[in-house]
Image (tube, coloured by chain):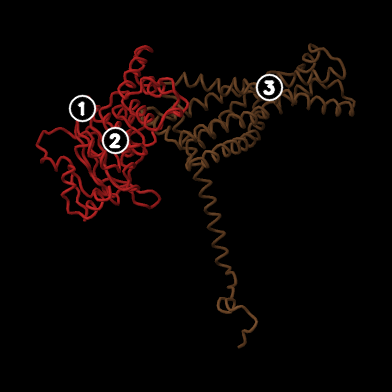
Amino acid sequence: MSNRGFPAVAVLNPPLPARHDDVISGVTSSVSRLFNGFFEWFGSLGIFSWQVLRAAVTPPYEWRELIRQLDEVGSKSLPLVAMAGAAIGVIISLEARYSLTRFGAKSMFPATLVYSVIQIMGPVITGLVVSGRVGAGMGAELASMKVTEQIDAIEASAINPYRLLAATRILACILMLPLLTLATDACALLTGWFAQTLVEPLSFHQFIASGFSGSTFNAFMPQTFKTAVYGLIIGLIACFQGMRTRGGAAGVGRAATNSVVLASLFLILADVVLVKFILVFFP
Amino acid sequence: MATTYDIATKQAAPKQGSPVPVIAVENLYKSFAGHKVLNGVTLRVNQGETLAVLGRSGTGKSVLLRLIIGLETPDSGSISIHGQNILGLALDRMGAIRKKMGFLFQQSALYDSLTVQENVAFPLEHHRRDMSRSERSDRVRQLLAEVGMEGDLEKMPSDISGGMQKRVGLARALALEPEILLLDEPTAGLDPISSGEIDELILKLQRERRMASVVVTHDLHSAKTIAGHLALLNEGDVVIEGTFDDLQHSDIEFVKEFLQQS
């Protein structure tokens, strides 16, 4: 047998053909790990939610921390959602006027703007903006407290951290999201009307009267108050990700990122269910 | 083979009707991800006693403290505080036990968004709602004066040194007038002068308050100064327990080596 011209190592250790069984078992174990991680995450979230719920409904109540969190989530997010709302109002106004003029339905402009803002864009934009600001902030704050043992110190001081840290933040998100949505809607309608007025004068009274004509409570309120569910999702995910953090500064970064990404994702997924629910129960 | 004693048996056989130990840890096992950290630890601490738990890094000393205060759950064994088994207690019921305990964390774990005085006031605000604002403020000042920090009330934790953070952590641990004091490496990372000051402070508190204390440390000098009894851990088990003299006269190879290296 002649091996001349070939590297010795290739002769001594010829490459082994990939075994079919090895590949299959590798894929199976990866998939199994993925599924385990997926179910473990949801299981831990379920346990965390139960602990927060139990802490939230039993005294002593942390009123002072709740008020601090209402300010943190509400007042401090207001400028951001107002600006986002203002931008959305102008965009919808420009797009709607162009499309409606094209199809000869210009008189429908106020109703289209009101419907688009209140039914669709306002709640989702508010949810996503708050998810970015509050979700990242809460996730990073709690994660930082976790890795520096401050949450352990709270627990060691005989204070329930689920009550003090998680329940107050989640409740603040639930209460503040609908109010922030109203602020987004108001800003969007105002700038939408203003953008229209610059092109074609229309009194604000006329705009509102025309926009809301034929609308009922059922048309708008559920869309606004569904954002309480968004608040629950944002608060719960951010607190959960923050309070289970491990691994120093890198862990804090991961917790902040995961809080925003997961909260935004679950918020959009929840919207699919909520829209269907509202269409069925508030036709 | 590791020799395990407990303080009660080391001193004298417990007489009938003798007081229940404040802290009783029996056959404690704990592992993390398959790695055994504690391997059947048994310890007892009575009222007014200070036990120093010594050992190399990673031998489960801090884990032992976290188990005693309920921040971790053991794989098996039992932990009793004043005769009450604390394992499996709900968070709020465990809270009632924790009010009797003060815990000084290794890195102090001060709340970084609160000032020095707000840190010390924190447990009082949550558990002493009967106190007026001025009473609470007086109490905080008194606690901070006890640890020599009365001049730094408005400073943030990030603005004070490691030794000062330990003092504030100690004041916070004492806020609820605990019957048990758990100290995790109180002198770690401090210069010899600051270490000596912290040791003096702990001794002074023990004389005045007569708490049951467990001090985790790898600083033999500090342990000798503040604790009447010492327990040496190795590979998750108590190798020897007794006075400093007992350790010095021990024939156990690991004890000799530890004393030589310290």
Tag 3 near tag 1, CB within 8 Å: no
Which residue was labeled with disc 3? A82
The disc placed on residue B86 is: 2
Question: What is the crowding at mark 3: few (fewer than 14 residues within 10 Å), some, or many (at least 20)?
Answer: many
Residue A119: image location, x then y, percent: 71, 26
Residue B16: image location, x then y, percent: 9, 36
Mark 3 or 2: in front is: 3
Q: Label 1 sits on what residue type? A: Arg
Task: Give the Cα distance between marks 3 and 1.
Answer: 61 Å
Can marks 3 and 2 be said to lie on one chain?
no
Residue A34: image location, x then y, percent: 54, 51
Disc 1: host chain: B
Query: Chain A takes which shade in the image?
Result: brown
Task: Give the Cα distance between marks 1 and 2.
Answer: 28 Å
Q: Which quadrant holds the C terminus of chain A?
A: top right
Which residue was labeled with disc 1? B207
